[in-house]
Image (cartoon, rainbow, N blue to C red):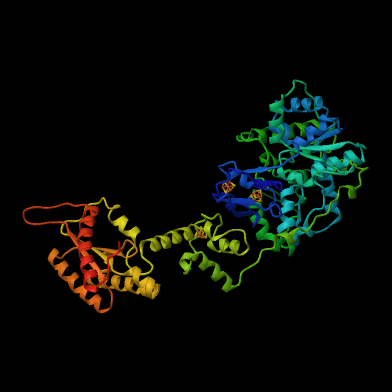
Amino acid sequence: MQEEGLVYTNENCIGCNKCVGVCSAMGACIAHVEGGKAQIAVDSLRCTACGACFGVCAHDARSYHDDTKRFFRDLGRGEPISLLISPALSAEYPELYGRILGTLRHLGAQRMLPVAFGADIYTWATLRYLDAHDRAGFISSRCPVIVSYIEHFHPELLSQMLPIQNPAMCMAIYARKRLRLKEKFAYIGPCIASSFDVQHKGADAYVSYNLTFQSLLKYLRAHGISEESCDEEIGYGLGLSYPAANGLASNLHWFLGDDIFVRVVSGKRKAYRWLDHNADAILGGRLLFSIIDIVNCSDGCLEGTAKESGQNEHDEAFSRLMQCIHAREQLDEEGPWSKRILPKERLALLNARFEGLQLEDYLRTFTDQSAQCQDWEPSHDEADAIYESMHKYDEASRHIDCSACGYDTCADMMRAIYNGFNNSRNCIHYEQAEADRLEKLSLYDELTGVQSHNAYLLATQYGSGFAELGTTFVMADVNGLKRANDTKGHAEGDRLLRTAAQCLAAVFGKNCVYRIGGDEFVAFVQGLSHAAVCARLAETQQSLEEFDVSVAFGTAHAEESATYKTYKTYKALKDEADKVMYKDKLACYARHGWKPRG
Ligand code: SF4
Ligand code: SF4
Ligand code: SF4
């Protein structure tokens, strides 16, 4: 199992396809077979680390990498490292929060830097940028999954992205440039995708480690959480509200009042569908929102992709965050977060607070990564060929749309197969059709067209079933088959078998004739007396000999008369018919002047 890439599939995968159904990044979930097991792997070039597959996988088969181990190793070696702390940490762990920081300080972490302060810078930078660029439809860049999705799947929207570093990076840049801190920074947050911002090397790297809540808490719980407590070192304002889905929107309204239209979109499925459907309208200037505050998780970072399971399931973190925001508004009597003054006064105070900052320091660029995510559309003929390989020959079978493969429609699955992301075996319709085909193949003898030995075993319950009363069991053996094969070739041998089978099927009906061995056939005949069956067999034997085909017959009858009934198993009837047939075989050999085989 490959562990490359940020998100990967582990050995628990059973190939249930659920992850395919929720993955918004076409081609990030790829069907493959490992050790004979169907599984769904992750293509790290396409995966945006949205985390949707973690939520639906019932087998705990998706994993991700973060930097927790490397961080503790480096800290243990005495490397100077300061922490960038997401405001979601105090909302998620109100009781443990101070002790988590205290433990990290005890282990050697240096400064405790609040990302809420970085978010205040993000708000300031966004307001400055909007002021200088008079157009609508900017897309917020605060969520790394959204950035990744646009870089991979909607590069045409990159020109609409707000080119501001995200709050954690803003905090790191401020610490590096203004506070002149030289040490490495580790970000503590609830997001797998924050690893996209991590720079593993370089003295100037802003963020060197992504520590997710999940793995950090796992580590600390295993190694002990101290009783010491400490707090963040810089005061902040309503940047505190960024973990909520409307964090940016609420800050913009705080400083601009109703003068700004902000569209808030969130959710692992909704956000991507929204972008897919509205990309043209954004580019065409038909959406009048000044800014689109869009994030991957429906409850914002409070529902982060790497939070511990069981946390925030009852909205407690959200209510705590709201409480803290309310307290902050009451506390800041004179500053930009004062409730008592007008939005434009707050804005003036915000600009004054960050007067010494250079907007350019907090700007970023984006990378078009769509070249590695090209999907191709099949031509009509190519689509047809793929549908046929899925045993879908008509329109109805091409619109079953049952989603068992993970895709919404059969057409999506067909396109996935065309692009190499999936294969027909993951289609339930294909598997059923294939099973029917194999069943047919196994129940009929390919050479003669009569039923096969498998069919005979099923019909007779492997010989142990009781034949219906009045049944005559016919045993037929083609004489001289080996001799024909050896002296005249297999084509002649095949002719003997086909002719014998056709004759029996013509006399007794195709549905009651079985080929049960190389040269052996049986037939179960009903509706005729034993004597009548024997008479027909004698005629059949004669006609076959006219075609140069010699067949020995033997019969056994499941008696039913006015006075008694004889229930016999098929095996018993076969043994009885076999003996009779053997006598007939000797007679046939004598007639032809052949020597019986030893
Ligand atoms: S959801 Fe995906 S990763 Fe999980 S078991 Fe199913 S196929 Fe495997
Ligand atoms: S993390 Fe998201 S993009 Fe990556 S494989 Fe899972 S569902 Fe797809
Ligand atoms: S019929 Fe096959 S291809 Fe169509 S949706 Fe169902 S599983 Fe997918």
Front residue of 257/524: it is 524
Question: Foreground residue, 239 or 219?
Answer: 219
Tell me if 593 is positioned left or right of 149 in this view.
left
The picture places residue 574, in percent across and down from the top left corner, at 23, 57
Q: In the rendered image, is residue 323 in sight?
A: no
**Residue 536 higher or lower than 460, as above or below:** below
Q: Is residue 442 visible?
A: yes
541 in relation to 215, above or below: below
Q: Nearer the viewer, residue 553 or 301?
A: 553
Residue 451: where, in percent of width, then height?
A: 32, 64
The furthest residue to the left = 563
Q: Which of 352 and 360 is in front in this view?
A: 360
Left or right, 562 with reference to 444: left
Residue at x 71%, y 45% (from the top left corner): 246
Seen at 8% across and 52% down, the residue is 564
- Direction from residue 426 to residue 501 in the image, left or right: left
- Please identify the residue farthest to the bottom as the structure is shown: 546
The percent coordinates of residue 282 (x first, y second) are 72, 60
Tally of marks: 0
Q: Is residue 364 above or below residue 172?
A: below
Quadrant occupied by the C terminus: bottom left
- Does residue 567 sit above or below 497 in this rendering? above
The percent coordinates of residue 263 (x first, y second) are 70, 52
Quarter location, residue 479: bottom left
Write down the quadrant of residue 302 in the picture.
top right
| Drawn side of residue 341 relative to residue 482, left or right | right
